[in-house]
Image: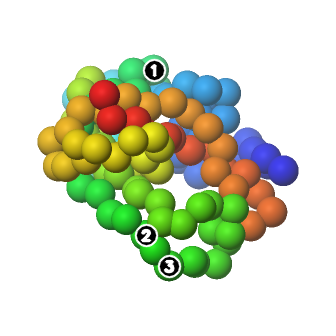
Amino acid sequence: MVQMVTGQLGAEGPYWEALAAGRLVLPRCTGCGKWHWPAVWRCGECGSWDHVWHEQPLAGTVFAWTRTHHRFAGTEGLALPYVTALVLLDSVPVRLSGLLEGNEDGLMIGAAVTGRTDFTPFGTDKIPSIRWTLA
């Protein structure tokens, strides 16, 4: 069951709503132009409360990755082992994590990846998420 409750998602609400709809959006301060992730209500650089959410392509390079062999609570729906990748986006200076899918040949820091949105099982819920594939 996917449950998205507007108003209860915090400053990052538009991110989760967009992921659930198959898109990636990230906030940029209208005062100074700084990209913020995680999302904030108020810019720490200039103090502005105004942010605009911009759609971004799901492409970048692997900044870090880890292979998980141990089952954690809520991850029973994931096949073991699984790889989580932290990716530096090509379009903006933001890093996002997601599961790596497909062939792992060539997996290393700096490897190019492309992404897509999906839903990851967590217990009985499905959480909007990013799936990365080596380019």
Q: Is residue 118 above or below residue 76?
A: above
Q: Which residue position is annotated with label 3?
A: 70
Query: Mark 1 sits on what residue?
Result: 55
Q: Quadrant of residue 75?
A: bottom right
For the residue labelled by badge 3, is the local secondary structure a helix, a strand or a loop?
Answer: loop
Q: Quadrant of residue 27?
A: top left
Q: Residue furthest left?
A: 110
Name the residue type under label 3: His
Observer-nearest of 37 and 24: 24
In 3D space, how far apart are the residues under numbered discs 1 and 3 (Cα atoms)?
A: 35 Å
Q: Position of residue 71 (x, y in %)?
A: 57, 77
Residue that carries the numbered disc 2 in the rendered image: 68
Q: Is residue 123 left or right of residue 91?
A: right
Q: Position of residue 92 (x, y in %)?
A: 26, 29
Quadrant in the picture for the C terminus:
top left
- Label 1 vs label 3, nearer the camera: 3
Determine contact: label 3, label 2, CB under 8 Å. yes
- The answer to which of 79 and 61 lies nearer the viewer is 79
Residue placed at 26% from the left, 24% from the top? 91
Residue type, numbered disc 1 = Glu
Q: Is residue 32 above or below residue 108?
A: above
Density class for disc 1 (Cα within 10 Å; few <14, some 14-19, many ≥20) is: few
How far is mark 2 from mark 1, CA to CA? 30 Å
Dot 3 alpha-carbon crowd within 10 angstroms: few under 14, some 14 to 19, many 20 or more: few
Q: Residue placed at 43% from the left, 47% from the top?
A: 100
> Is 117 situated left or right of 4 in this image?
left
Question: Three-letter amino acid code at disc 2?
Answer: Thr
Where's residue 41, x and y in %? 45, 46
